[in-house]
Image (spheres, rainbow, N blue to C red):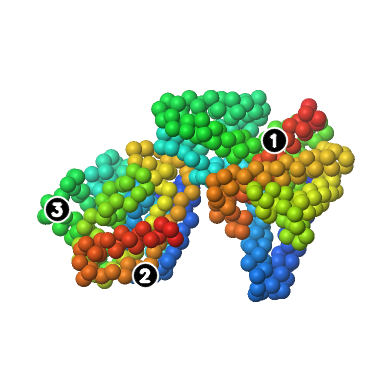
Amino acid sequence: MRIPTDTGLAALVGGVLTLLVVASIAGRILRVRFATGAASATVDNINARIRAWWVMALLFAAATATGGWGSIVLFNITSFLALREFVTLAPTRPADHRALFSCFFIVTPLQYALIALGQYGLFSILVPTYVAIFIAIRTALSGDTERFLERTATNQWGLMICVYFVGYVPALMMLRIPGYEGQNAKLIFFLVLVVQLSDVLQYVWGKSIGRRPVAPAVSPNKTWEGFVGGVVSATLIGTAIWWATPFSPTVAAIMSLVITLMGFAGGLIMSAIKRGRGVKDYGTLIAGHGGVLDRIDSLCFAAPVFFHLTRYFYAA
Amino acid sequence: MIDTAFVGLSRMLSGASVTWHCDPRARAQRIYFANHSSHLDFVVIWSALPARVRPLARPVAGRDYWERGAVRRYVARDVFHAVLIDRCGPGSCPRRDARAAIEHMADALGDRHSLIVFPEGTRSPDGGLGAFKSGLYHLSRRRPDVEMIPVHVENLNRILPKGEALPVPMLSRVVFGPPLATAVDAGKQTFLQQARAALLALRAA
């Protein structure tokens, strides 16, 4: 295995680790200041989130440092875990069992194999076309017509969000950008960093000055103040690290803005699904954050848009 | 080695979140009695136990199913050290066979093992809780010194339903309740009703 000695990537990883150290120290200070009282639960949750961020950041940095393979494996596992959470909440019936088995153990690895093999054509149509057809046929053959459309549509949506959209993150490895050869791992880093920072900053702004909710029926925690503050500050950070991307500072700013807006929309949509099913979190895998799907909801919707914009304007 | 693989596989397929209302690490001998809806039930319960006590916990399973084929026999005997008992068909059990099964389980407990049992005797297809067979009462009467722990498992009937050979991964829940307070002196009917109620109480928890 070749560990690329990319100083840009090293700088990005170093920046994230520094940020985590600062966050951990801030978390300690908060814990001392709010040891008791109403805010202590929030502080405990913040500290749990920071600890989970350490694990996620180290896993992600290690995966990116392998120069591609690692991120394909990491996001394959992420897709598997996200789909597991999605299907748990889906209104499945026993007749869906075999179609779902194929989704987990055939479609998901196949989609990531296509990424590894650089088969962009089949990668981009497998789930929306062939799998959509397969799920409908397989479910129809099982002979259970109760809520047929709802079941097939839900399972198809699960694959779209958890496998197809998430797959667009490592799919960035497939792009051939003139003058940026061998550096695509940084593109993945850019996307994930801006999306996740936007989530964190929306949370921070929202908790500190948030007043007016954006969509109280969907998610009471998303406020206009948090939204604007998070989007603006994450966009500024994305612009500041333009040197890690093939973009100019202006384009990096536009890309960051698009990523953060898509990320916000993703979070809202996944909250709406949860509300519709009457739950708060998709799971309990990541302490403080909920499930995997709760953590990657914004990434799901930002990744395909970022991929296609980059591909259209930059790839050879 | 192979048991670690089973624990990993069980976690991958069931994503079980585990809640304890009793001391998970206690060295006491226990009879874990659980609702039954899937072949995965005992694997997931066994995997949820702390590594220290896991090798001492033996699932009780039907000989007819687990001795069919070399793979199942190997898994049942060598991985889980299952206690395989002869099940009776539908209807009542000949007294002699039932007594032999209880003796077999009591022997398997020995002086350090625990058991994982399913007092309904068979898998419920919809995740509901059926009536308990009397085995649990007779076993408790035979070994009153052993703690009875109700264990509620949820959603495994969707992961590996009756009649399916391949699993669909989903999240599930395992709740270990406090030791059953009712003693066998209460009589068979009361004991079984209270045991079943203790298990049902974990459903809301």
- Between A246 and A204, the residue placed more toward the observer is A204
Q: CA distance from mark 2 to mark 1?
A: 53 Å
Q: Position of residue B159 (x, y in %)?
A: 43, 43
Residue shown at the point (78%, 54%) measured from the top left: A225
Residue that carries the numbered disc 1 in the rendered image: A304
- Between A25 and A32, the residue placed more toward the observer is A32
Residue A2 seen in this snapshot: no
Q: How many marks?
A: 3
Which corner quadrant of the image does residue B54 belong to? bottom left
Residue shown at the point (65%, 28%) measured from the top left: A124
Q: Mark 1 Cα within 10 Å, few/some/many (few <14, many 20+)?
A: many
Residue that carries the numbered disc 2 in the rendered image: B27
Vertical position of residue A133 compared to residue A3: above or below: above
Specify the quadrant that holds the N terminus of chain A. top right
Residue shown at the point (62%, 55%) measured from the top left: A289
Residue that carries the numbered disc 3 in the rendered image: B97
